[in-house]
Image (cartoon, rainbow, N blue to C red):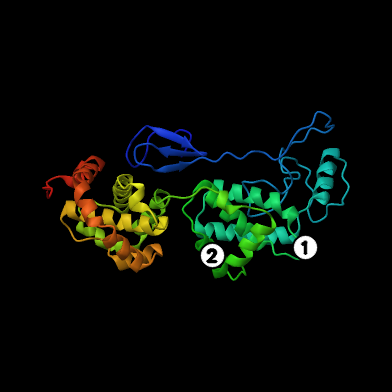
Amino acid sequence: MSETQTQCEYCRSHDFVNSRGEIICAQCGTIFERVYVQSTYSISETDTHKPSQYTDVGKRLDRINNLGSEIGYYRRMRSSVNAPKVATSDSKLNTKLYRLNKSSMTQTHIRTLSIFNRISAQLQITPSLKSRSLYLYWKYVGKLQKKKSHLPLIALCLLYAVRESKSPYKFSEIINSFKSNGHRVTNRNVLSLAMDLNINLSKANVRKSEDYIERITEKIAADDRVQKKLHMYDNMTPSRYRMLLMRVSYHLLSTLDTERRRGEQPFGFAVTIVYLADRGIRKFFRKSSLLTQRLTAEITGAKEFTIRDHFYKKRMMNHLENQFDKVSEIIRKFNPQLADGIEVIG
């Protein structure tokens, strides 16, 4: 979200809410990200040099794809990092060179954070989540035993940051992303490392099904097989379908009490709710469903039998029938042009 943007591009609302460093549209729930990075540099009253930079060398939280310093960046006189022992007449530059020599940056950290950068791009995690994971990495890397791999540590830091922020990423998804890139990161060594470092993952926030809805609907709307079926709905674009699917899903979840959710895995239950929301949209428009249980499972990575069990054991169709009037109202308010000329089935 740009600093000059005051209107949501999806629902045209002007009402925004600031939550955990992210700007969220209060009307449709769209997230416009704004990240605030706190400097790691502290200025002491006894400092004799006034630095031209206020971050530790190589530890800028908003740049994890490299560990380069800012030496001579704003100066005409530059010095190569590969030759830090070269003396210069600039005392401030010599001070920076000394700090670089004393820095704990090693090739191990460079490789670890380079891999983490690729993993974060593959998972499409937010910059705020990257910064938090990197902060935890530098916090615990000094406590890591010698000859221990740094990759399980960065995976553990990412897992803790995900659970802390209630981000919609599963533990198995994080582990599989490292494995798919050819790295030996397993559930066992990550959990074992958490015990060694006394990191209690159970203290992290417990996620709800609502935390997964946005990411599930994004995957579904971006799938080619779903987009090919959208021609059945007049004026229905993938972005509109995603926002409509998300709104109906949130409403259906809000009407389910704790007793109905008890004993169910949050992610699998969220996938079932999104599938149910598509059934509600189909009934309103009197069109064929865009989603099947098999297609939903293939797109989201859930199990087909999990969706089937939730759908029938929880009597989801009965719940949709009870909420259909409200679902119809949500669809009409979302975009009246889509609902013009449609006679709602009672």
Task: Examine the rendering and report whether any part of residue 210 can be seen.
Answer: yes
In the image, which is nearer the foreground, mark 1 or mark 2?
1
Where residue 118 is drawn, which disc sits there? none
Mark 2: few, some, or many residues within 10 Å (few <14, many ≥20)? some
Instruction: Please name the residue shown 26% across and 56% down the image.
Output: 316
Q: CA distance from mark 1 to mark 2?
A: 25 Å
| Residue 334 position by quadrant | top left
Residue 24: percent from left, percent from top: 43, 39
Where residue 177 is drawn, which disc sits there? 2
Instruction: Please name the residue shown 22% across and 56% down the image.
Output: 317
Task: Examine the rendering and report whether any part of residue 113 can be seen.
Answer: no
Is 41 placed above or below 205 here? Answer: above
Of helix, strand and loop, which one carries label 2? helix
Instruction: Please name the residue shown 67% across and 52% down the image.
Output: 137
Residue 253: percent from left, percent from top: 33, 48
Of helix, strand and loop, which one carries label 1? loop
- In this rendered view, identify the residue nearer to me: 26 or 55: 26
Between disc 1 and disc 2, whose residue precedes? 1
Mark 1: few, some, or many residues within 10 Å (few <14, many ≥20)? few
Residue furthest toward the top?
45
The residue identified by callout 1 is 146
Q: How many numbered marks have been drawn onto this rendered protein structure? A: 2
Residue 205: percent from left, percent from top: 52, 47
